[in-house]
Image (tube, grey):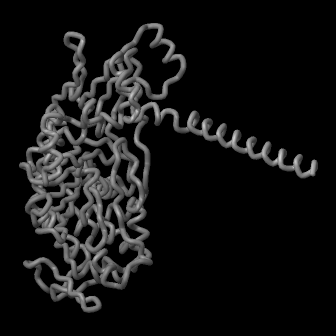
Amino acid sequence: MMTKLKRNVRLVFLLFCGLFLSLLGYLTYFQVYERQKLIESSYNRRLWEQEESITRGTIYDAKGKVLAQTVEEDGKKERVYSGGEAFGPVIGYSSRKLGRANLEQALNGELLGISQQDPLTVLRQKVLGVSRGNDVYLTIDSQLQNLAYKLFNKRPGALVALDPKTGAVLALVSSPGYDSASVEQKWDSLSQDENSPLLNRALQGLYPPGSTFKIVTLSAALESIADLEARTYNTPGYVEVNGRVIRDYESFRAGNYDIKKAFSLSSNSIFVKVGLEVGKAKLFEKAQDYGFNEGLPFELPVATSRFPQFSLMADDVELAESSIGQGRIVATPMQMALVASAVANGGTMVKPYIVEKIVTPLGEVKGNSGFTIWKEPIDRMTAEKIKEFMVDVVESGTGRSARIKGIRVAGKTGSAENPHGKSHAWFVGFAPAENPKIAVAVVVENAGSGGTYAAPIAAEVMRYYLYNR
């Protein structure tokens, strides 16, 4: 009996030791790995109390224009926004009533000065009585941002413009937008608006990419079909796959085309044939190489662009649709801007960023550490061939409305079918083609032809940037 009692006591002791060690491990995990996240969480009520004693940092555009700042009058602090509707979906808001959103949320720790700092800096700030957060300088030029926003003329859509060599985001537009300065007063109407102005379409909008995805299909084909450029494809203007008829656009003429002309004129029927020859595995792999099905590293949350697992593709019909950017493929404008930037940058896709530098109250600068390679989906030779094809799209194909006088533009149009109305109009491209300085992706919802509605927006944005930077 005594032996059994000792054994039970030992088991209880070991159980409590295990529970104690589990609790210790749990607390250690949060202290080491989750501490900063909890400190900066918008659900942490102490942050609002802390904001009473700390002046929230200022957000500037690339040229030093104030976009958001905290002003104090009669002992009361107020967050003031001056960016207008073009910047609402980017800057967001910081409100006791509504909480925080977008960059105001993502950079909350920096703006309050509670992000991870070295002990010496913390000590210096305490000694000097620093009572304000860090200032943030963005990569976005507000003049370019406002121009791009106006070009949409309130039509739902999005634009991403970035430097393909560095990844710096030059413009990030979601239309319609909202003014952060009046978001509290207009919250009910904004939140109920069927055009979803609170949604950042550039980062969270998922659209079938349509023919802009032919860049990915062409990449896979150039790498896997040895004599692709020497071939001639005959098409009657449509192709039938297992009973499913996929047609070219209405004015496309039946005939013989090489792959360059088929890309320039955006032939669905020929690219379906190419995609079927490439095969499910290689097309899926190439989409993955370009960043589909993977979280995109960025300061703001970006929805994951999706390409269906080839093992789940029901038959060749889905492969055929995927080859031309239809079916179950969806992509964000940010993703497609990066696809264009990879071609522009010789096959290298760099990590995008929107924060140029952070300046502490003591004048210390935490700058962007420079470009970071994220993906290398194609080699330089393949990139140069695709660039040549994309130049032909703008010079003599479906993207002629993206031409800029005196500048060679490379691009690809898209008209993505969707079940909710007219096709979404797409354009992706970059300029100058020989030494790209800007890459863009534009989508205009339910507009129709990408060459008619998206390409002119892209051209105006690229023209302004190249002549005014």
Quarter of the figure with residue 95: top left
Look at 37% across and 65% down and name the residue there: 382
Furthest residue toward front: 1
Quarter of the figure with residue 58: top left
Q: At which x and y percent is residue 269?
A: 22, 82
Look at 28% across and 53% down and name the residue there: 204
Horizontal side of 112 relative to 415 (left or right) equals: right
Q: At which x and y percent is residue 164?
A: 31, 48
Q: Is residue 362 something that shows in the picture?
A: yes
- On-image quarter of the C terminus: top left
Look at 32% across and 80% down and name the residue there: 318
Look at 60% across and 36% down and name the residue there: 27
**Above or below for 124 versus 436:** above
Front residue of this view, candidates 194 and 164: 194
Q: Is residue 226 something that shows in the picture?
A: no
Horizontal side of 370 relative to 196 (left or right) equals: right
Q: At which x and y percent is residue 449?
A: 11, 66
Quarter of the figure with residue 21: top right
Front residue of this view, candidates 425 and 124: 124
**Above or below for 343 versus 230:** above
